[in-house]
Image: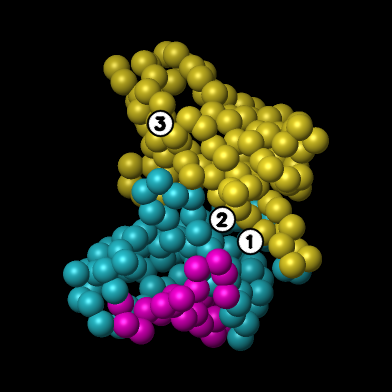
Amino acid sequence: GDQVEQSPSALSLHEGTGSALRCNFTTTMRAVQWFRKNSRGSLINLFYLASGTKENGRLKSAFDSKERYSTLHIRDAQLEDSGTYFCAAEATSSGSWQLIFGSGTQLTVMP
Amino acid sequence: EAAVTQSPRNKVAVTGGKVTLSCNQTNNHNNMYWYRQDTGHGLRLIHYSYGAGSTEKGDIPDGYKASRPSQENFSLILELATPSQTSVYFCASGDAPGRNTGQLYFGEGSKLTVL
């Protein structure tokens, strides 16, 4: 089965509200990255975490390797936050660490 | 600021035609990657490289070739394009040592449509 399970697959928020995205892992991951694909199609780096939490503006991410999950919290959502969000985790493969992507969360922020 | 640029950004090709997607990075990273992203899927690894002259098969290499002529450049080649290769392709460079992925820096994507 998939090593990275991302949820929800789609999410609608009104401006000013917040929510959380989650990735569950079926095995121990070394680190996790979060990306946003914006309306122009560009992949934007949001966070890279080997452990703990990081915060940047209205976004906050957490990674718990032992409990095998990572979250991305969005607060005070704005229209420009709309896009597809991906998590990607580093898993061992043939002796090295390689990225495995979640299937993405399509976020729509409404006025 | 990490810089990865892809070209072309948009391409329409005919079935059976040859397509080359180019990627240039100014990060001096050893590792470079080509992914494709389709609706409902995460990014899937096609080919990658650990340095000039090296190419390695990723998870979905069939129908694709890769070329790494220099540290800065990594190309993805579709010798005989098929409609199933219609997708958005992302190039990335990585700053981890050895064969680890580490933190990736992505280009802006290349949208390929094969008719």
Q: Position of residue B106 (x, y in %)?
A: 51, 56
In the rendered structure, the colour chosen for chain B is cyan
Q: Nearer the viewer, residue B105 or B115?
A: B115
User: Residue at point 66% right, 74% down?
Assistant: B50
Q: Position of residue B104 (x, y in %)?
A: 60, 55
Left or right of B39 in this view: B90: right
Q: Which mark is residue B94?
A: 1
**Mark pair 1, 2: CA separation:** 6 Å
Q: Which mark is residue B105?
A: 2
Whether labels 2 and 3 share one chain: no
Assess whether mark 3 and mark 2 are in contact (beta carbons under 8 angstroms): no
Asked whether the viewer can see residue B75, the reply is: no
User: Residue at point 53% right, 63% down?
Assistant: B45
Q: Main secondary structure of the magenta part?
A: loop
Label 1 resides on the chain identified as B
State which tag comes first along the sequence, 1 or 2: 1
Asked whether the viewer can see residue A72, the reply is: yes
User: Residue B64 appears in which quarter of the rendering?
Assistant: bottom left
Badge 2 marks a residue whose secondary structure is: strand
**Mark 3 = which residue?**
A10
User: Residue at point 49% right, 17% down?
Assistant: A18
User: Residue at point 58% right, 48% down?
Assistant: A2
Label 3 resides on the chain identified as A
Q: Which mark is residue A69?
A: none
**Mark pair 2, 3: CA separation:** 25 Å
Q: Which chain is yellow?
A: A
User: Residue A92 appears in which quarter of the rendering?
Assistant: bottom right
Badge 1 marks a residue whose secondary structure is: strand
- Label 2 is placed on what type of residue? Tyr
Q: State which region is magenta.
A: B57-81
